[in-house]
Image: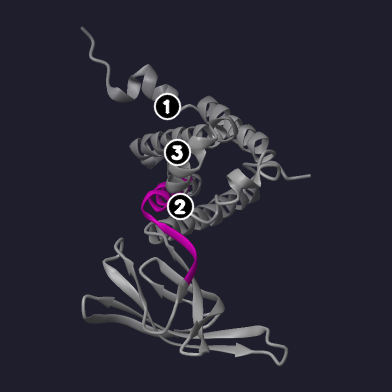
């Protein structure tokens, strides 16, 4: 009996096919376009989509309105299948890299796409998107995903003559137990950044205490564990585009490609 290798299998050839790429990409695009029409008319459902990780939103919000949100998980599955298709194409290219190395730019774009998608899925499940976090000086917020706590050590809102806030001066510190991990003075355009964590001062409020009003800082806290992986994917795609352009114009100078009219 003739033994058929994995790479000669019909399923493998199907996973590597360009037709599958076109079908998946087209279906995901059309689904996203059609579904996005629902967003402006249903702010009570989609208004929180950007304020929390996608995985949390799907569990807490989407499950309550499946008739309006079904297209998001379906579209996500199509994109995941597209990533699998892209990864299979990349693996198949590696098998024949000696004869296909000139297409390295195209496959760098492919693997960059896969890395960015993996980073997005990682961040959507393990990340943090939290707004309107009010802290008085001396108060802390635990961040168990990172094993640290965020402490506001000093705060001074800078106000315009009319009382409008023009700058938020915060001294923020990260502690692991009693150990200081990082301390930085932040502003509206200079957030605290550490290992995928981004803390941005956005506004302030006041609370009565001891016969006077005490200001407190309002922070937006975002954490994306896949940020470095997404950056690596973006670099791979950028290098792939550059190599593809170089290859294209070198072939054109040799007459391998027709001029673009």
* In the displayed structure image, the side of residue 146 where residue 216 appears, left or right: right
The residue closer to the viewer here, 137 or 80, is: 137
- Residue 83 is marked as 3
For label 1, the crowd category at 10 Å Cα-Cα, with few meaning under 14, some 14 to 19 and many 20 or more, is: some
Label 1 or label 2, whichever comes before in sequence order: 1
For label 2, the crowd category at 10 Å Cα-Cα, with few meaning under 14, some 14 to 19 and many 20 or more, is: many
Label 3 or label 2, whichever comes before in sequence order: 2
Q: Residue furthest top?
A: 1
Q: In the image, is residue 252 above or below residue 91?
A: below
Label 1 or label 3, whichever comes before in sequence order: 1
State how many labels appear: 3
Identify the residue at horizontal 55%, vertical 79% (top origin).
204
User: Residue 9, image x and y in percent?
Assistant: 34, 19
Q: Secondary structure at mark 1?
A: helix
User: Residue 189, image x and y in percent?
Assistant: 56, 78
Question: For mark 1, what is the residue?
Answer: 15
Q: In the image, is residue 29 above or below residue 233?
A: above
- Are the residues flagged by discs 1 and 3 in contact, CB closer than 8 Å? no
Highlighted range, magenta: 110-133
Image quarter of the C terminus: top right
Q: Secondary structure at mark 2?
A: loop
Marks 3 and 2, how far apart at CA? 21 Å
Residue 143 quadrant:
bottom left
For label 3, the crowd category at 10 Å Cα-Cα, with few meaning under 14, some 14 to 19 and many 20 or more, is: many
Question: For mark 2, what is the residue?
Answer: 53
**Visible in this render: residue 181?**
yes
Q: Which is more foreground, mark 1 or mark 3?
A: 3
Image quarter of the N terminus: top left
Q: Residue furthest right?
A: 261
* In the displayed structure image, the side of residue 260 where residue 132 appears, left or right: left
């Amino acid at each position: 009996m003739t033994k058929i290798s994995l790479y000669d299998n019909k399923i493998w050839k199907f996973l590597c096919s360009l037709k599958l790429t076109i079908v998946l990409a087209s279906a995901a695009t059309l689904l996203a376009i059609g579904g996005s029409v629902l967003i402006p008319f249903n702010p009570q459902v989609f208004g929180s989509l950007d304020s929390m990780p996608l995985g949390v939103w799907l569990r807490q919000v989407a499950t309550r309105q499946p008739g309006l949100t079904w297209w998001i998980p379906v579209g996500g599955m199509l994109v995941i299948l597209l990533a699998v298709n892209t990864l299979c194409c990349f693996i198949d290219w590696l098998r024949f890299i000696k004869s296909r190395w000139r297409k390295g730019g195209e496959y760098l774009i492919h693997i960059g796409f896969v890395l960015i998608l993996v980073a997005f899925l990682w961040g959507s499940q393990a990340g943090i998107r939290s707004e309107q976090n009010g802290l008085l000086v001396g108060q802390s917020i635990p961040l168990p995903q990172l094993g640290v706590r965020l402490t506001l050590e000093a705060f001074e809102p800078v106000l315009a003559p009319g009382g409008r806030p023009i700058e938020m001066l915060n001294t923020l510190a990260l502690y692991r137990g009693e150990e200081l991990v990082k301390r930085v003075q932040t502003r509206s355009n200079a957030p605290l950044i550490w290992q995928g964590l981004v803390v941005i001062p956005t506004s302030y409020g006041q609370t009565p205490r001891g016969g006077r009003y005490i200001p407190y800082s309002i922070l937006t806290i975002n954490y994306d564990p896949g940020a470095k992986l997404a950056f690596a994917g973006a670099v791979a795609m950028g290098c792939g585009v550059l190599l593809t352009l170089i290859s294209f114009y070198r072939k054109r100078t040799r007459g391998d490609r027709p001029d673009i009219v």
